[in-house]
Amino acid sequence: MSDSPVPIPVPGSRVVSRVIDGRALLLDAGQDRIERLNDVGSFIWGLIRERRHGADALAAAVVAEFEVAEAEARADVQAFLDELEARGMVRYA
């Protein structure tokens, strides 16, 4: 068993977000780019903003909220986090 802490995704330093009509809008101030997330992405973003959930916890929350298979949720959450990280919209604490 590893004693290393779980990496926690947190919003990037240049990202400002708002929820409008249940959908998260992410503004990357450094790129002047806005991303509008779908329902699942908005749900995950809300948890990311809490700054206390690792990828496994995010996937478990998606399973509970959206009735999706655990393996699918894990893969989709990781792909979403990877995409956000590549765009500088999340970093790991």
Image: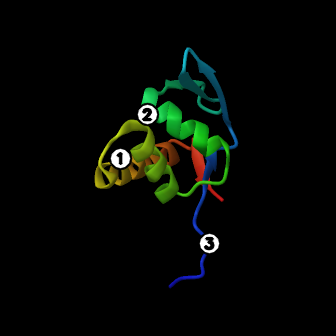
Q: Is residue 29 left or right of residue 35?
A: right
| Mark 3 surroundings: few (<14), some (14-19) or many (≥20) residues within 10 A | few
Disc 2 and disc 1 in contact, CB within 8 angstroms = yes
Amino acid type, residue under disc 3 in the picture: Pro
Q: Is residue 46 above or below residue 51?
A: above
Identify residue for label 3.
5
Q: Which residue was labeled with disc 1?
A: 76
Residue 29 visible? The answer is no
Compare marks 2 and 3 and give the one earlier in the sequence. Answer: 3
Q: Residue at x 54, y 20 (%)?
A: 22
Q: Earlier in the sequence, mark 2 or mark 1?
A: 2
As shown in the figure, which amino acid type bears the numbered disc 1? Answer: Asp
> In the rendering, at what x and y percent does residue 50 appear?
67, 45
Image point 41% across, 48% down: which residue?
Answer: 77
State the residue at coordinates (65%, 41%).
Answer: 49
Distance Cα–Cα, label 2 vs label 3: 26 Å
Left or right, 40 with reference to 52:
left
Of residues 67 and 51, the one drawn nearer to the viewer in this rendering: 67
Residue at the limit of the structure toward the bottom, as seen here: 1
Image quarter where the C terminus lies is: bottom right
Residue 73 image offset from top left, x and y in percent:
35, 48
| Mark 2, residue position | 40
SS under mark 2: helix
User: Of helix, strand and loop, which one carries label 1?
Assistant: helix
Q: Which of the two labelled residues, at mark 3 and mark 1, occupies the earlier sequence position?
A: 3
Q: Which of the 4 image quarters holds residue 74?
A: bottom left
Rendered residue at 30%/55% (across/down): 71
Q: Is residue 56 above or below residue 80?
A: below
The three-letter amino acid code for the residue at tag 2 is Val
Between the C-alphas of marks 2 and 1, the distance is 10 Å
